Image (tube, rainbow, N blue to C red):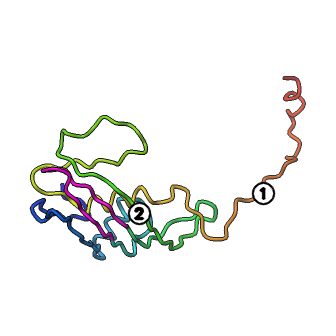
């Protein structure tokens, strides 16, 4: 299955001094990404990569993701636009050569097959990681919780514990 944002890049294009490249999502790709991310809209997405070879077939990718998305505020349930900017570093490794390292400080590894890496899918994954799981509209605060709730008919029973 081809991902929503598909930008295959041949490893042969990455020379000894690396490669700088930028991908931009089309309107149709943004709409498909919004559906995948289960948010109202992805209005724009651009991702720059600096790719460096590490040996014959491992690639270190440093990148900056910039996007504008529409999310739904978890407090007001209103939609609002918000910018997303994420600086990241990942490694592309041949499928089956991923490490078993579970250190959260180590670089994420993205497996690939053949002689191509997919920069679009890498950017999509970074967007998913960068989205706030509990988005709030700017300036919106959680409502105050009443410290003294109304008396409950069984409140006296609670005091017996």
Determine whether the residue tagged by mark 2 lies in a helix, strand or loop.
strand
Seen at 33% across and 64% down, the residue is 63
Judged left or right of residue 127, residue 25 is left
**Does the residue at mark 2 contact the one at mark 1 (Cβ under 8 Å)?**
no
Cα distance between the residues tagged 2 and 1: 35 Å
Determine whether the residue tagged by mark 1 lies in a helix, strand or loop.
loop
Dot 1 corresponds to which residue?
144
Seen at 38% across and 37% down, the residue is 102
* Residue 17 x, y percent position in the rendering: 19, 65
Dot 2 corresponds to which residue?
87
* Residue 34 x, y percent position in the rendering: 38, 65
Label 1 neighbour load within 10 Å: few <14, some 14-19, many 20+: few
Task: Decide: is 6 above or below 83.
Answer: above
Range shown magenta: 47-64
Residue closer to the observer: 12 or 2: 12
**Most frequent secondary structure within the magenta stretch:** strand
Mark 2 or mark 1, whichever is nearer to me: 2
Residue closer to the observer: 145 or 150: 145
């Amino acid at each position: 299955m081809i991902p929503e944002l598909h930008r295959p890049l041949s490893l042969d294009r990455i020379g000894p001094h690396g490669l700088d490249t930028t991908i931009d999502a089309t309107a149709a790709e943004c709409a498909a990404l919004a559906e995948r991310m289960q948010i109202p809209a992805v209005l724009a997405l651009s991702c720059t990569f600096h790719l460096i070879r590490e040996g014959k077939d491992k690639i270190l990718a440093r990148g900056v993701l910039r996007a504008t998305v529409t999310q739904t505020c978890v407090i007001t349930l209103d939609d609002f636009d918000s910018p997303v900017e994420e600086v990241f570093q990942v490694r592309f490794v041949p499928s089956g050569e991923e490490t078993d390292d579970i250190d959260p400080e180590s670089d994420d590894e993205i497996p690939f097959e053949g002689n191509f890496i997919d920069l679009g899918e890498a950017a999509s994954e970074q967007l998913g990681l960068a989205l706030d799981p509990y988005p709030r509209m700017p300036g919106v605060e959680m409502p105050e919780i009443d410290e003294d709730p109304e008396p409950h008919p069984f409140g006296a029973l609670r005091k017996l514990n």
